[in-house]
Amino acid sequence: MSKKACALFILVFLAVVLIRVYSISGSLVEDSACDLVDIWTGERVETCIGYVDVLFAELREEEGYLRMTINLSESIPEVVGERLYYYLLFDSDDDSENNCADVPFAQSDTMYVLVYDGAWSLSREEYYSWGWDSSPTEAYFRIGGGGRVLEIIIPLSELPSYNFIEKLPWRIVTEAEYVAGDLAPDAGMALMYKYEKTAEVAVRVPVEVSWISIDGQVYASEGGIEISLPLGEHVISVPEYVNVSEYERLVFVEWSDGVKDNPRKIYIGEGGVELECVYERYLRVDVVSS
């Protein structure tokens, strides 16, 4: 009579997942603290008014809208001694020929003006050859972060040239009336490029692994894949196991950052991500004894 026993030998196999980011951060402006100026002359002032002092501003495109987020150094008080202005400037058609030439609104043709004088109001103005003129708007605003964060949400329909330009120049100008204000960026216009920020994702796996899944989309693999993905959260998975032959199997163990979930969530940021997928190789050895 004979008996069969299986002895397992384990080999560790690494599949490299390398994510390289090719993108720019043209929609974000970081600004120094307490760098206030007289916005009409550009001269530096010693006064530091935190609730008009911009720390950073970010412009992002959402479905059908632009969202501007302004973070201030200090919260806006309920009672202020002067009227407060927060201007969002655009060169809406990216054409310098039809822009305002006068500071602090130079290089722009459209502005949204958020005003606080005990009550909040938001208006829209467009530049013509004779000057600035009010126009209707369906834009709206939010005040958050304990009075330190301002959001202005603008329908893209109010920027009719948006679909025909590759980049949108913008700037933030603030002012405590007749006292001091801030410029972000300090000079010129920031640029929001319209193409989607993406990351080049390279996934290397053993040649025996025939597929890789990203966000539910299965990609055939012959040793790996390369694909460009938008920045943000994604779900990636690989096979739990692969039967190489009757006597050999690869079994998923973990990712190099210690995460054992498969599938797993991964966030692709502008700094890039590098992961390794760890497999164990199992070999079956038949031992025959009598």
Image (spheres, rainbow, N blue to C red):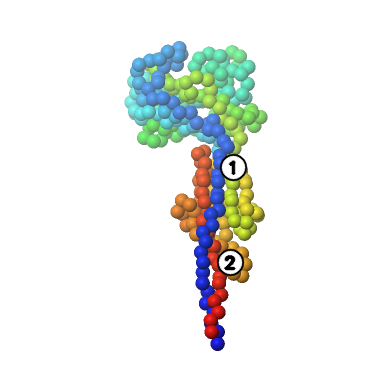
Closer to the chain start, of discs 1 and 2, is 1
User: Which amino acid, by three-letter code, is at mark 2?
Assistant: Glu
Q: Residue at x 47, y 24 (%)?
A: 184
Q: Would you place residue 285 above or below residue 157 in this image?
A: below
Residue in front for this viewpoint, 116 or 179: 179
Which residue is denoted by mark 1 in the rendering? 200
Residue 265 horizontal/vertical position (percent): 50, 51
User: Callout 2 environment at 10 Å: few (<14), some (14 to 19), or many (20+)?
Assistant: some
Q: CA distance from mark 1 to mark 2?
A: 33 Å
x 59%, y 18%: residue: 99
The residue where tag 2 is placed is 248
Q: Tell me the element at label 1.
A: strand
The location of residue 102, given as percent across then percent down, is 53, 13
Residue at the limit of the structure toward the front, as seen here: 290
Measuring from the top left, give residue 286's x and y in whole percent.
56, 75
- The part of the image, by quadrant, that contains residue 41 is top left
Indicate the quadrant where residue 229 lies.
Answer: top right
For image coordinates 56% across by 16% down, the residue present is 100
126 or 73, which is in the foreground?
73
Across and down, in percent, residue 223 comes to 63, 53
Q: Residue furthest bottom?
A: 1
Q: Amino acid at mark 1?
A: Glu
